[in-house]
Image (cartoon, rainbow, N blue to C red):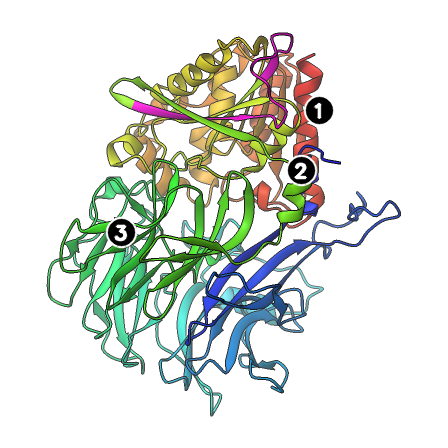
Amino acid sequence: MTRTIQPDYHYHLKTASNPAISPDDSTVAFIVHQFDPEPNASGNPRAPDPSDSPDSKAASTDVFVMQLGDSGDSGEPIQFTWSGNAAKPAWSPDGRQIAYIDLDDEGVNQIFVQWFAPGGRGAAQLTHRLADVDAIAWSPNGRRIAFRSLVLGPDELQAVRADPSEPKIRVARRIRYRQDGVGWRGDSFYHLFVLDIASGEVAQITGRDGDDGPPVWSPDGKRIAFISDRNDERDLISKTELFVRNADGSALEQWSGDLFMVESIAWSPDSKRIAVTGGKDRSEVGGYGLTAQSSVYILERGTEPVKLTDDSLRPHAMGTGSPVNASSPFMAWTDKGIVFGADSRGQSHVCIANPEAAGDVQRITDGWQITEMVSSSDSAFAVVAATSPTSFGELHLVETKSGEIHGVTRLNSGFFENHPPATLEKFSFERDGFEIEVRVWFPPDFDPGDSTKKYPLLLDVHGGPHSAFYDAFYPIHQVGAGAGYVVVAPNPRGSSTYGLDFATAVHTDWGGGDYEDVMMAMEQVAARDYIDEDRVVIHGSSYGGFMSSWAVGHTDRFNAAVIAAPVTNLPSFYGTSDIGVNFTETQFGGERFDRLEHYRKHSPLTYARNVNTPVLLLHGEEDVRVPIEQSEQYFVALKRHGKEVEFVRLPGTGHGIFRAKHPLIRREYFRRMIDWFDRHNA
């Protein structure tokens, strides 16, 4: 018996990620994330008790391996680790060992290694750091491992060594003293180290203020390339540069010239050049590494960067300061060219660029959303972690010559056989010279020909603003459609993957043209015969939360609003967010005190007295990106003026609510959303 996708869908799904192909291209290692599948008396996955701590163990990540057959399909994955915390596998150059990151007995991420050959020994711990390791790379000869680790500042180091029962006093000396998903940073920075495997000796090869890494070895094994934000204005701007250092820590060189941002790295086979993704113009950066648009460049020491790709592609980024993306290999350079992942108009592609000819770029795939990609040694194929409208969290093998795609994992095929997903339609319209693309998701049983049935409509606004909705499974859309809503998901001006002019059109104008874009998208669908125009609701998170709170302050069109982690008060966001200064100055054209009236004019809090729509606020209590004070202020303003509003505080949760550690948080988010909509849409 089939059923629609419900708020508890994530209990049933697994996610494959961190793919790594063995040196002989025969096997892929990857991790599988899954929530606790322990059945209850009814045989369904266990739903944690509401009294569970948000940090209690409810999920696991372990390394698995699979043989890659001619079609990419080679049976079931074989579990390689059993700790429940392993991630980021990396093959030794001889293919005999797999290194990975796992927790030690103190709860710190360290490097572990296991033999892959039959009869091999168990796991061995290679590092004993006081703070987390988050990226690893074998040297080409297999004798050393370069890694990135957080280096604690003096105060942070003293706090770690102090009596745990004593209060820990924290001192901030810089604007960027904390980070969403990481917590307190203080004077701590990510730096690079080289581990000699035989002796166990570890040498630190980078230092000073700024985050470095992750490390990328040159093919000849002599040098390590890395990205760093070690410039003097790192607290104020999002500039990153490419550096190359000898593996012994000597001869540091800057290779990126006048590029404003560098995001990913791939050495040429002869170790003389480096391909990167990045941008020259500060306008290409949305603030704190939130790239609006980037390109592939070729770098060579002492020469100007050579641009290979145009505005029609947005290459994927590896990242620098965020441990989430610290080792995702999105580019590879072999004799066949530069293989990289990229996005265009809400779709992802595997691409090959000719390093000797600007503009000579071939798109191998169309559709879906690629989250990670790794190439085989000769670029004959790539393995991607991808999500489509009808699948979630699987690995696929892409043949680069033919473009043929083969499934590698089928972790969730059984779930989708019994839980049909929403179906997708796309259309576009023009406003102010921009083409606005809209995705519409329909309930699985949708029948446009049934004149007796009218469907409620849910308008969803994405975050960013330089994010985008893709041709991919997205929780809000699937759960909303599963509850019977037609979901409208526009990519208004400001969205990425549609070129630089489109992305930056939102700068200094939040709530202007972007608001008109999403409203027109909604109204075009609301006017269809099968939509009940009297049952229309809105949802958004982060920048989407800004847009939702802005909308209800400017129109009574919606019966209900669910607003998550919203930016509501730009002047206070500037001073409390971990990205408040550089992000907000980029988005709103200047420093807070110089633009104070502009900040206030574009703050939803300014219009709170106009709200007549019932509002449900949801916010993570550990959100550093958009601190919970943004919802607190909005809640008090609405309540003080007699508006209908509820405020749900989510414990142990940062800005990525959909990535909350505990599945109960995710389930309650979706359950409360649908309940709020249904209650006010009757």
Q: Nearer the viewer, residue 575 or 107?
A: 107
Question: Which residue is pictured at 65% across the width and 12% down the height?
Answer: 642
Say which amino acid is labelled 3.
Gly
Position of residue 55 in the picture relative to residue 212 (left or right): right
Circle on res. 638:
none
Q: Mark number for residue 278?
A: 3
Q: Quadrant of residue 305?
A: bottom left
**Residue 283 visible:** yes
Q: Is residue 3 magenta?
A: no
Label 3 – label 1 distance at C-alpha: 43 Å
Q: Are the residues at dot 2 and dot 3 in contact (C-beta closer than 8 Å)? A: no
Above or below, 389 against 149 in this view is above
Q: Secondary structure at mark 1?
A: helix
Q: Amino acid at mark 2?
A: His
Using residue 359 as the reference point, say whether residue 141 is left or right of it: right
Q: Name the residue tied to disc 2.
A: 419
